[in-house]
Every structure is written in C-alpha cells, then in structure tokens.
Image (cartoon, grey):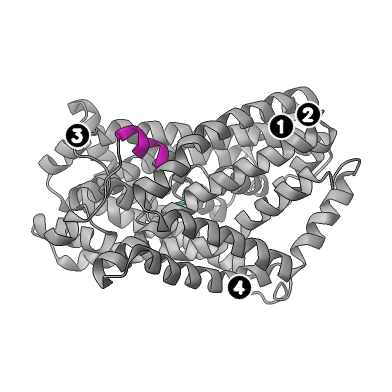
Amino acid sequence: MSKKRENHPQWSSWLLFVLAATGSAIGLGNIWKFPYIAGQNGGSAFVLVYLACVLGMGIPMLMAETLIGRRGRLNPIDCMEVVAEEAGANPHWRWLGGMGILLGFLILTYYSVIAGWTIAYIFKTAAGVFLGKGASEVGYLFAQFIASPWQLIFWHSIFMLATMAIVARGVQGGLEKAVELLTPALFILLLILVGYAMSAGDFQRGVRFLFYPDFGRFSGESLLMAMGHAFFSLSIGMGAMMIYGSYLPGNVSIAKTSLIIAVADTSVALLAGVAIFPLVFANHLEPATGPGLIFQTLPLAFAQMPLGSLFGALFFVLLAFAALSSSISLIEPAVAWLMEDFGLTRPLACLVSGFGCWLIGLGTVFSFNRWSHLTLFDKTFFDLLDFLTSNLMLPISGMLLVVFAGWVMQPEVNRAELSTSPCLFRLWWLLSRYVAPATVGLILLNGIGVL
Ligand code: TRP
C-alpha cells in the first residue's frame, strides 16, 4: 500500500480542492434534475424536505466521506480497507468502496447522455433554431431530437470523449485546469438568468410554487426522491468525494470546506429553480414536464431575450462544463482503482472505463426512442437506472459510509481530520452516529413500501 500511496496525487491547494469538489457537486443535478423533479413532486414541499435532508444528513455525510478519503489516501477500495484495518475492523469494508466505484460508473452512463443534450443545445441555440418559435414548437423540436438515436449517440460520444480527455491528463494537469474557470462563470450566468426571470417571467407564481408549502402532491416516493437527490447533488456515496478527499493535503479543515461546498451547491439548485419556474408559468408550460423541462423552457426564454442566441448558447456551454466537472468525479474513482490495483496507465484506465460507460449509456439513449415502450414498473431503462442508483443505492452506500465514520473509526481520528470547534464536532458526531443513519433507514424502508 505504501508504494501505491507514493504515486497517489495531491491537489495543489485547498482552494483547488474546494473548486473541484464544488464543480463535482454542481452539475446537471442542480440545473436539469432539481427543477424537473421538484416540478413533478409538487414543488415547495419537495424543496423543504430536500433542504432538511441536505442539512441533517447530506452535510455530515459529505464530511464523513471526505475524511475517510483523506485518512486512507488511496482509491476507494484500498482506502476503505486501510482505514478499516487502522480502526481494527473487518477489511471487507473494502466492498463498500467497490460499491461506490460501481455506482459512479453506472451514474455516468446516463449522465453522459443528458450532458450530450446540453452540448447539442449549444449549437441549436447559437444557430437561432428557436427564434420566433412558441412553446409547442420548442417542445416539438425537443421531442423530435430525443426520438433520434443517432443524434443522441453522437452527442453522448462527444461528451464521453471530452470527459476522458480531461481525466487522462491527471489531477493537476487535467482536473484542476478544468474547474478553475468554470465554477465561478456558471454562478454569474445563473444570476443573469434569474434577473431575466424576474423581469420577464411570472416571478411571483414561480417563487410561490417553490417555497409556499403544499404537501398535496408529496408521496412516500417523493420523500425518497428528495433524499436521494440531496445526496446526488452533493456527490455523496459514490467514492467521488472519497477520492477527492484522498488528494487533499493534510492540514485543511474538512468541516469548513464541506460547508462551503454544500452552501454553493444548494444555492445553485435554488437559483436554478428561481430562474426556471417563473418562465415555466409565464409560458403556460406544465411544471411536471419531466426530463425535458429545461430544454423546453430555456430556449423559449432565450429566444425572446435581446442577444438571446448568444446568452442561450453561453448558458448551455456552461451547463455542459458543469456536467463535465461532475462527470470527471464520477469516473475518477474507477480510474484510480484500475491504476493502483491493476497497474494500468492512466490513459489506458480511462479508455477501458470510458468505453464501458459509453456502451451501457446506449441503454439510456434507446430509452427515449426505440425502447421507450419497454418498461418495468412503469419505468424505462433510464428511469429504472436513475431510480435504482440515485434513490436506492446511493442512500444505502451513503448511510454505510456515515456509519463507518461514526461507529467504526476512532473519535480522535475524526476530530483531527475534521479540525473544527468542539461544539461543531459534537453536532457532527450526533448527526452521523444517530440522526443520519436512522433517518436514511426509515426513509428507505418507507420508500420501498415496508413501513
Ligand atoms: N453532483 C452531481 C450533480 O449534481 C453529480 C455527481 C457527480 C455525483 N459526482 C457524483 C453524484 C458522485 C453522486 C456521487 O450533477
């Protein structure tokens, strides 16, 4: 293990870690998924529960996963093994690391397909395809686009290639360079869009939909989705934060950096909602439209804005970049594992894992066209994969990680890694030992219909 550790890279500074982890957290989850699932689950009630999940479980879990990573300083499988051994526990905890690697890989298979849509929309908005079109025409163009497997495969391939090109360059040469500019730029563009929604959209109705509590359409499944999404959005439970934590220099406070990441991530999701729902209502669209929501509202908004083609294209560029800074964290655990445990070079490890993702991603591509009629429990391949990974496996793996940090690792080790005030440490301790595991467990049992 010590030989492997010698070659394990490090971020150049704590700020780069924060940027990379924030870049990982902010992605399609915030701008594409959050508004559409909030819309499907009745809006405000979903948002409230989501916020409670971020605070009570997400943040302690984010800290737990990062600290395990920094303690182990290896890929998730080996990392879990050495930290378990250090604590005198069973080395089979390594399988939890393995589950994280697999989950990240599976999520990337569909993440890349949707990210491909954002790249396609850069070109469509820039070319002015939506200029002068109404809501139904924009909706029709989207339906036509996803009905074509070849187009989706093309953009999915481009996105996978871009991800692999960055990851192949390594931590300092690839990952760091990619996140430095993108994360701040996305914030600025989102604020511009909120400004536009305030002036041109039905702002009051949009904000009411998001923040005025209404539990009418909220179900047991909604609760599960709100929790799963809180974890998905913070990039917890899949080894991404563990591997990023393992590249983190030793003297940085994990409590402080985790809080910054969580605040940035949550504000981007809320801002995206505040930008999108006023436009949904002003254009008489349905909030429960589903995965196509932003691809139907935003082009409409941009088509009516002065310099709309420019802003629209820019927005989709940034969205594609936000997706890229997340996708690299989804595949990095697998790549680090293939390198450290099988001796592959970084480019070869990228090629193998990237090709696998691309291939399974075709299942998601076909869910929107050729296989759209093939459903199980009323869900297509894409819906099923998304539901299983983000709503079931992710909470399970996040819960096991926080149990590991809270119950298996020694308190002194946790205290040293988190480096925060005694009072905050106690709070983390209570949340991660009792509150987070128990709540996740209850919500899971409720969601799968046992309770
Ligand atoms: N958080 C990202 C988003 O919101 C997705 C993501 C990237 C992710 N890495 C992850 C989710 C690791 C879970 C685990 O789009």
Name which residue type carries label 2.
Answer: Asp
- Looking at marks 2 and 4 on the same chain, the residue that comes earlier in the sequence is marked by 2
Dot 1 alpha-carbon crowd within 10 angstroms: few under 14, some 14 to 19, many 20 or more? many
Q: Can you say whether 21 is above or below 361 in the image? A: above
What secondary structure characterizes most of the magenta part? helix
Q: Which residue is mark 3?
A: 251
Whole-Å distance between the Cαs marked 4 and 1?
A: 35 Å
Whole-Å distance between the Cαs marked 1 and 3?
A: 44 Å
- Name the spot of residue 221 as percent of width and height, x first: 55, 56
**Residue 116: quadrant of the picture:** bottom right
The reply to whether callout 1 and callout 2 are in contact (CB within 8 Å) is yes
Q: Is residue 99 visible?
A: yes
Left or right position of 420 against 109: left
Nearest the viewer among 133 and 393 is: 133
Dot 4: element: helix
Whole-Å distance between the Cαs marked 4 and 3?
A: 44 Å
Name which residue type carries label 3.
Answer: Asn
**Residue 347: quadrant of the picture:** bottom left
Which numbered mark, 3 or 2, is in the foreground of this view?
3
Image: magenta residue range: 13-20
Disc number placed over residue 363 in the picture, else none: 4
Whole-Å distance between the Cαs marked 2 and 4?
A: 38 Å
Q: Quadrant of the C terminus?
A: bottom left
